[in-house]
Image: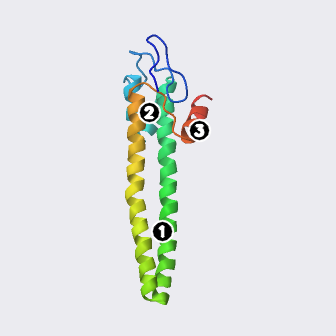
């Protein structure tokens, strides 16, 4: 993607107009710094409650809070599913002997891989969003970004 010519702002959901430089927020920080810090989940919750005027900070703070809540629900669902699958695999392995043990091992390896990849994906997305916020861009995460934007613009 090309950069826009000097003096022109890029438009679109991923490159919204950056906040005015030098404008402080009610947090006392520059808007881009406050928005980037809001991707620390509890800080995002605090900034969303404290900040009443700056929509840029409110958007990033709310997006962080919603994204964190979605991940908490996802982790709970995955833990419940993993418990169910492990119980079923355990029963199958005891009934099927060696073939069942192989199935149990395979299920365990897949579960371990999922638990290695998911936190990295979560952290990588948070870092990407924080960097974009620091650059002054309104970077919308899929689904969560649209929800945050609607709630902030009310």
- Viewport quadrant of the C terminus: top right
Task: Judge left or right: residue 139 versus residue 123.
Answer: right
- Vertical position of residue 127 compared to residue 32: above or below: below
Q: Residue at x 45, y 23 (%)?
A: 2
Q: Are marks 2 and 1 in contact (CB under 8 Å)?
A: no
Label 1 crowd bin: few (<14), some (14–19), many (20+), radius 10 Å:
some
User: Which sits earlier in the primary sequence, circle 3 or circle 1?
Assistant: 1
**One can see residue 35 in this view:** no
Please state which of the two labelled residues, at mark 2 or mark 1, is closer to the viewer: 1
Q: Residue at x 44, y 16 (%)?
A: 20
Q: Position of residue 147 (x, y in %)?
A: 59, 38
**Label 1 residue SS:** helix
**Label 2 residue SS:** helix
User: Which sits earlier in the primary sequence, circle 2 or circle 3?
Assistant: 2
User: Which sits earlier in the primary sequence, circle 2 or circle 1?
Assistant: 2
- Vertical position of residue 109 compared to residue 153: above or below: below
Which residue of the protein is positioned furthest toward the top in this rendering?
7
The residue beneath circle 2 is 47
Q: Position of residue 75 (x, y in %)?
A: 47, 58
The residue beneath circle 3 is 147
Label 2 crowd bin: few (<14), some (14–19), many (20+), radius 10 Å:
many
Observer-nearest of 93 and 47: 93
What label sits on residue 82 in the rendered view?
A: 1
Observer-nearest of 53 and 34: 34
Q: Residue at x 48, y 78 (%)?
A: 89
Q: Position of residue 143 (x, y in %)?
A: 57, 42
3D distance between C-alphas at marks 2 and 3: 17 Å
Please state which of the two labelled residues, at mark 3 or mark 1, is closer to the viewer: 1
Label 3 crowd bin: few (<14), some (14–19), many (20+), radius 10 Å:
some
**Label 3 residue SS:** helix
């Amino acid at each position: 993607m090309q950069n826009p010519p000097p003096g022109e702002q890029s438009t679109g959901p991923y490159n919204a107009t950056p906040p005015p430089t030098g404008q402080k927020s009610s947090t006392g920080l520059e808007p881009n710094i406050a928005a980037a810090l809001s991707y620390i989940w509890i800080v995002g919750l605090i900034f969303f409650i404290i900040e009443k005027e700056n929509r840029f900070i409110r958007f990033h703070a709310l997006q962080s809070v919603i994204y964190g809540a979605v991940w908490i629900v996802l982790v709970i669902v995955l833990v419940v599913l993993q418990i169910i699958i492990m119980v079923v695999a355990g029963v199958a392995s005891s009934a099927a002997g060696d073939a069942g043990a192989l199935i149990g091992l395979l299920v365990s390896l897949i579960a371990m891989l999922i638990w290695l990849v998911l936190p990295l994906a979560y952290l990588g997305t948070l870092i990407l969003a924080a960097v974009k916020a620091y650059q002054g861009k309104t970077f919308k995460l899929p689904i969560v970004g649209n929800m945050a934007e609607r709630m902030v613009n009310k």
